[in-house]
Image: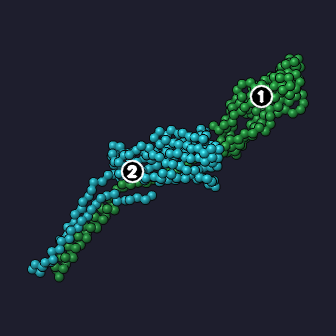
Chain colours: A green, B cyan
Amino acid sequence: MSDNLRVMRSGKIGLTVIVLAVINLTTGGLYAQSSVEATAIAEVVDVLKASEVHSLNFGKFTPEEQGGEIIITPDGVRRSNGTVSLSGGIFNPASFQLFGQPDAPVSILLPQSTVVLTNSITGKQMEVYDWTIGGGISLMGTVVLTKGSAIMNIGATLKVGTISDNPVGQYSGSYIIIFSYN
Amino acid sequence: MKEIKPAIYLFITALFLFCGGEVAGQTTSEYTARIIKKPTAPSLVITKNNDIEFGSIIPSATSGSVTINPDTDVVTSSNVTLLTSGAIRKSASFNISGGANQSLTFVFPATIQLSAPGVSPKMTYDLTKNNITKLNQSGTATLKIGGTLSVGANQPPGSYTGTFQVTVNYN
């Protein structure tokens, strides 16, 4: 009986060693490998588009003997100086509609040199300068495309010569305005 | 996150010697346990500093790409316009800690897809890592993952995201 007990006791000792070893495995574990997750992020934005809603139009006028200037502000106010006499009819600042990424800032680059208007019949010319954007921004400004769009009104000053310099007729020319995302 | 926990090398051998002969009515059994513990390095841990961001991109009528060099963070592009306003373009960055001078191996996908809600098609992102092969003497290193994002012709606008897992191992 006692022999049997001794065998059983010895067996318990062996079992205890194994159990301790298992505990050591689980509590003293080190990490030879580690992982983490990351995210790749990119924002594709709408292509910026601009279209001319209204051409810049100084309207009808008479230079009289000395000529002068006609100024159209971005908010559509027209005035003159010198001997230029303003007449009725349609006049307006240039107007552009912008479409693009909502809330994106867009920079505007106005003509930085004089633009020439030419009478296609006589070849006589007038000059346009002092381009201005609404809100007091001049030459280069920035607007935000609230809800993805914006209207830009642009004014300028027309230099008018004498009646012999600028006889009756229609004068026209083109210019470039650059809109770009910041 | 899936971890292989016991990086400890513990071998147990149990030698059971049964001396089954009976001497004067006694039965003896001897048990020997031998434990061999292999030297181990400190736990290897990787944590993320930041995700990879390609910033705001204007596609064109021609397919293009944006590439962030993971070693230099230099950004290059073709056939797309990169907006500068509020643009943050940087590689994903991860801190790694473990045993000093331990060599490392990395596992991450070569390519994943970036998608935007309700938008098709997706964009393909090819991942590349910086030139890192081991931990320094302090047992630390920085892993950076950059790569190339392919932007389709007239890629639809949207906020594109995609996830990937990075695993680091002792070599």
Residue B123 appears in view: yes
The residue identified by callout 2 is B105
Q: Nearer the viewer, residue A154 or A56?
A: A56
Q: Residue at x 33, y 51 (%)?
A: B42
Position of residue A97 measured from the top left corner of the image (x, y, whole percent): 75, 40
The amino acid at mark 2 is Thr
Residue A125 placement: quadrant? top right
Q: Look at the picture and state if A157 lies above or below A32.
A: above
Give the letter of the chain under mark 2: B
Position of residue A87 measured from the top left corner of the image (x, y, whole percent): 90, 28
Position of residue A181 measured from the top left corner of the image (x, y, whole percent): 65, 38
Of badges 1 and 2, nearer the viewer stands: 2
Q: Residue at x 63, y 46 (%)?
A: B153
Give the letter of the chain under mark 1: A
Image quadrant in which the N terminus of chain B is located: bottom left
Residue B2 placement: quadrant? bottom left
Q: Residue at x 28, y 67 (%)?
A: A19
Pointers 1 and 2 in contact (CB under 8 A)? Answer: no
Q: Secondary structure at mark 1?
A: strand
Q: Look at the picture and state if A175 lies above or below B62.
A: above
The residue identified by callout 1 is A156
Asked whether, in this view, residue A11 is left or right of residue B6, the answer is left
Residue A146 appears in view: no
Q: Secondary structure at mark 2?
A: strand
Q: Look at the picture and state if A15 lies above or below A139.
A: below
| Measured Cα–Cα span from mark 1 to mark 2 | 65 Å
* Circle 1 Cα neighbour tier, 10 Å, few/some/many (<14 / 14–19 / ≥20): many
Q: Look at the picture and state if B10 lies above or below B137.
A: below
The amino acid at mark 1 is Ala
Residue B87: assigned label? none
